[in-house]
Amino acid sequence: MKESCHIDISAWKSFPMSELFTIVHGTRLRKQDMKEGSINYIGASAFNNGVTAKIGNTESLHPAGTITVCYNGSIGQAFYQTEQFWATDDVNVLYPKFKLTPQIAKFLIPIIYRLSLNYAYIDKWTSEKMLLTEMPLPVNASGEPDWVFMEQYINELSIKARTKIDLLYKLLGGGRKFLNINTWGVFCVGELFPNIVKPAVYHSHELEECKDGIPYVVRSKFNNGIKCRVKALKTIKCSPAGVISFGAENSSFFFQKESWCSGRDIYYIDTRHLSMNACLFLSSCLQTLTGKYDYNFGLFPELLKKEIVKLPVNEKGEPDWYYMEHFVEEHSLKAKRVLQELS
């Protein structure tokens, strides 16, 4: 039987974030003003603990032991910072009014992200709004946040996760495995896929959330880009299933297996002539292009069409979609077997 990680929150109590944190706004630093150095620069990113550069500037640093939260761009992406850092002006820094340990931070960060879902690009989670936000937390007998429980809970989860990771490593045979791409061909994205489409844009306030509705795809690197599911109203022009979506800013490539609608700056590559598994392989290859595109330099269609991607080739030197399809199928079956062993 699979273990449940659900927590009974019926007895939790909500606290204004102003009671828990002092919230400090980050400081803009232009790329041309960055000095070489080893200090973490925290940007509006969902990856690498928010670190988007290393700098030598020291005028506006924040201390270790704080939490950074994107209020613009990758809204709600929060990270615990273990070293001093510079936060950009798209980021708020949470200074705790209690003893914040790494374990407590790991407990709080998913809650912070969940609270951020009430906000979108056009309705930023500013420090003023954040201070008024109510954060639900477990409480002790005195009705105060139960920091001891939070720390112990994360410690227990970490032990369980480590055990399963060790088992997974053993089942997979250990070691990192790489594909040999020396024989792969080089292709211009625009020549392979001339039809890159900008779908109709819908803001969250125009939509009605519905558990059984269609995916609402936004500029997120998580959950296949899906923020939530919404009602498929007659006024909504859906994008087709079987395509690869990507966000111009905070770009990630995702295969959409059902009809969907999109938020701002989302596009799709028309790949309906390919199988799902071939598209999943292709998405991974396209993802290698995103490193040089960030929130301030978006991957828009005309730029993507000029990009070069490496792909397996057949005897004719064409993309080997058959190989890609069966590669994903084979590894999906292996992954299912591993998951069965872990459950």
Image (tube, helix red, strand yellow):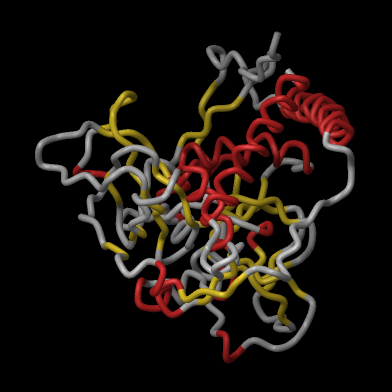
Q: Nearer the viewer, residue 97 or 104?
A: 104
Q: Quadrant of the C terminus?
A: top right
Q: Nearer the viewer, residue 162 or 331?
A: 331
Asked if residue 76 shows in the view, the reply is: no
- Seen from this angle, which residue lies furthest front? 315
Task: Identify the residue at image location x=42%, y=52%.
Answer: 125
The number of callouts visible is: 0
Task: Identify the residue at image location x=33%, y=33%.
Answer: 229
- Residue 168 lies, in percent from the top left, at 82, 32
Q: Nearer the viewer, residue 249 or 168?
A: 168
- Residue 5 lies, in percent from the top left, at 66, 20
- Seen from this angle, which residue lies furthest left? 234
Residue 87, quarter of picture: bottom right
Q: Is residue 294 left or right of residue 171?
A: left
Residue 247, quarter of picture: bottom left
Q: Is residue 305 above or below residue 282?
A: below
Asked if residue 215 shows in the view, the reply is: yes
Q: Is residue 134 above or below residue 285?
A: above
- Seen from this angle, which residue lies furthest top? 1
Q: Nearer the viewer, residue 135 or 207?
A: 207
- Residue 174 lies, in percent from the top left, at 89, 42
Q: Quadrant of the N terminus?
A: top right
Task: Identify the residue at image location x=64%, y=86%.
Answer: 34
- Residue 43 lies, in percent from the top left, at 58, 67
Q: Is residue 122 above or below residue 241?
A: below
Q: Is residue 182 left or right of residue 281?
A: right
